[in-house]
Image (cartoon, helix red, strand yellow):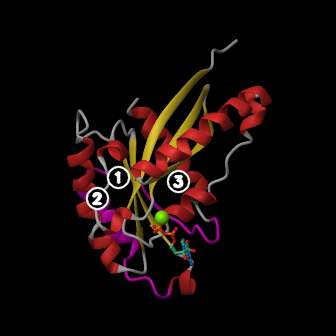
Amino acid sequence: MATRRRTLLKVIVLGDSGVGKTSLMNQYPNLPIAVFLGWGKVLILLWIWKFSQQYKATIGADFVTKELQIDDKLVTLQIWDTAGQERFQSLGVAFYRGADCCVLVYDVNVLKSFDTLDNWHDEFLKQANPADPRKFPFILLGNKIDIDGGNSRVVSEKKARDWCASRGNIPYFETSAKEDYNIDPAFLCIAKAALSND
Ligand code: GDP
Ligand code: MG
């Protein structure tokens, strides 16, 4: 029988306020955790959850966990989202520490949110200080492609892909948190990228 390995990976989500980071995280469905763990462990998790809420309030961030099956591995993604402080760019060191993957998000209808990607990318590398910055896995999501049937977008797919190429071939996905478009493939890619850093 194949052995199963459980891996916990930390993913952090960065991008300007309002681009849809929290919506994307909440859109991605969680597999029923009770099926994997049994109810006894779920009760223990609830107990831990109570304390983690307190902790999260203290550091001003929030995370959700998502379970994915990749080949023979059960992967738990711990996805960290800011509690709105991205506006002031004052995310504490605890937010970045030990990250396995960084998801950058912009809004295809807002040029400024694309232009600030360089800042987010650099800020992540500065704060998280990964062992090999050139190999650290990033993913870019261009969100809100549903708005106005795509007629109000100001950043073309080509422009986004060119940016990704210039930053070491970052994988790129166009998404809509509102219409649940392309979220599953994006998260599968995120999990694989995070695993590659494990
Ligand atoms: P955050 O500040 O990056 O976490 O952004 P939020 O997730 O709070 O989203 C900001 C606003 O954009 C909210 O009103 C969302 O409902 C909306 N929103 C998020 N994603 C989408 C999307 O894909 N399409 C549309 N039309 N609206 C979205
Ligand atoms: Mg948010």
Disc nearer the start of the sequence (2/1): 2
Characterize the local packing of mark 2: few (<14), some (14-19) or many (20 or more) Cα atoms within 10 angstroms. Answer: few
Between marks 2 and 1, how big is the CA–CA gap? 25 Å
Residue 100 part of the magenta segment: no
Characterize the local packing of mark 3: few (<14), some (14-19) or many (20 or more) Cα atoms within 10 angstroms. Answer: many
**Residue 93: which quarter of the image?**
top left
Looking at the picture, how far across and down is residue 183, in whole percent?
Answer: 58, 58
Q: Amino acid at mark 3?
A: Ala
Residue on which the image places disc 3 = 186
Looking at the picture, how far across and down is residue 96, in whole percent?
Answer: 33, 45
* Dot 2: element: loop
Identity of the residue furthest to the top in this view: 1
Residue on which the image places disc 1 = 170
Between marks 3 and 1, how big is the CA–CA gap? 12 Å
Residue on which the image places disc 2 = 90
* Dot 3: element: helix
Q: Nearer the viewer, residue 177 or 175?
A: 177
Q: Residue at x 30, y 41 (%)?
A: 136
Looking at the picture, how far across and down is residue 145, in whole percent?
Answer: 52, 75
Residue 146 is left or right of residue 162, and the answer is right
Q: Amino acid at mark 2?
A: Ser
